[in-house]
Image (cartoon, rainbow, N blue to C red):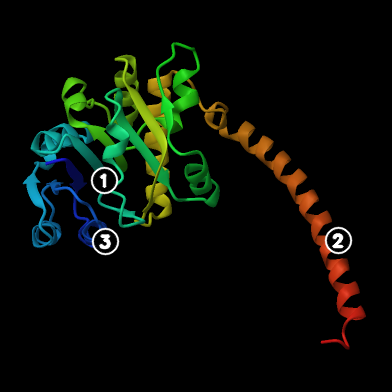
Amino acid sequence: MQLSVLIRNLNEGKQLEQTLCSLKRQCTDFEHEVVVIDNESDDNSVEIAKQMGCKVFTLKRAAFTFGHALNYGIKKCQGEIILILSAHVILLNEFFLQNIPQYFDDLKVAGLRFVHAVSPEQVVDGIQNGPQQLIYSDSSNFVLDNWKNFIVNHCAAVRKSYCEEVGFNEQVFASEDKIWSLAILKKGYSILYDVPGFYVYAKPFNRTTKIKRATIEEAAKQLITGETEATFSLPYPVFLLKRIGKGLKQTSKDIRIHSKIYKGIRILTKKYKSTF
């Protein structure tokens, strides 16, 4: 078995089915498997996964942490290369899996970070520049400077044997992927980021969920790096006043732009009214 796909799931029937459909469309010339670690779902997730040919293993909710679910799932995978996917991710072309093994030809490569296709700029950068290699440096800003280059576990490929050497932290409440990246880099391995495999995170989130996720992720980042993001380094009233000041400057600029466009439209429509 050359490659395994590992998906963690809890009551994500609809999104899981979409993810598995994108996997069914994959064209490969090698054998691969899909392993689903289910966290005692109450919906039809398990039924969907089994119907679509997945290997399903149950992890009790009481035993769940992000890191533990990953370590447990990795042990169940037969492939030396493991693509870790969220149950909400859709791969954007049929050769996503086929292209993964080539990036592990270099034995120093421990993991891959793919391109989340949230903006044309990120996609173009991935196509034009291709994968970039990240190796460890003891510079004081290394973690902050490379936070967005570490693997992200909603879509990342890792080498199983290196995950067995350096497991995912099972105690933390978030950013287990960043902790693993830093630990694996310190071992002398490397990570490739901006790898031109493109995907989207398809699950919509309401405002409450977005706030909760942002809070958890930012708190974990501060604990790992020992640094506070500039946005959250000030009490809210001070931050708000600064934000209002910037907003007023932007509003003034927008008004001037709007005024010029408005006047230009009036001139053109009056001049060419008879033409149209």
Q: Is residue 97 left or right of residue 193?
A: left
In 3D space, how far apart are the residues under numbered discs 1 and 2 (Cα atoms)? 48 Å
Q: Earlier in the sequence, mark 1 or mark 2?
A: 1
Give the amino acid type for the residue marked by disc 1 in the picture.
Answer: Leu
Residue 97 at what x, y percent from top left? 27, 48
Q: Give the residue pinned by disc 3.
A: 18
Quarter of the image with the C terminus is bottom right
Q: Does 261 sit above or below residue 3?
A: below
The residue that appears at 13% across and 53% down in the rendered structure is 41
Q: Give the residue pinned by disc 1.
A: 85
Closer to the camera, 31 or 236? 31
The residue that appears at 38% across and 54% down in the rendered structure is 205
Give the amino acid type for the residue marked by disc 3 in the picture.
Answer: Gln
In 3D space, how far apart are the residues under numbered discs 3 and 2 (Cα atoms)? 47 Å
Quarter of the image with the N terminus is top left
Q: Give the residue pinned by disc 2.
A: 260
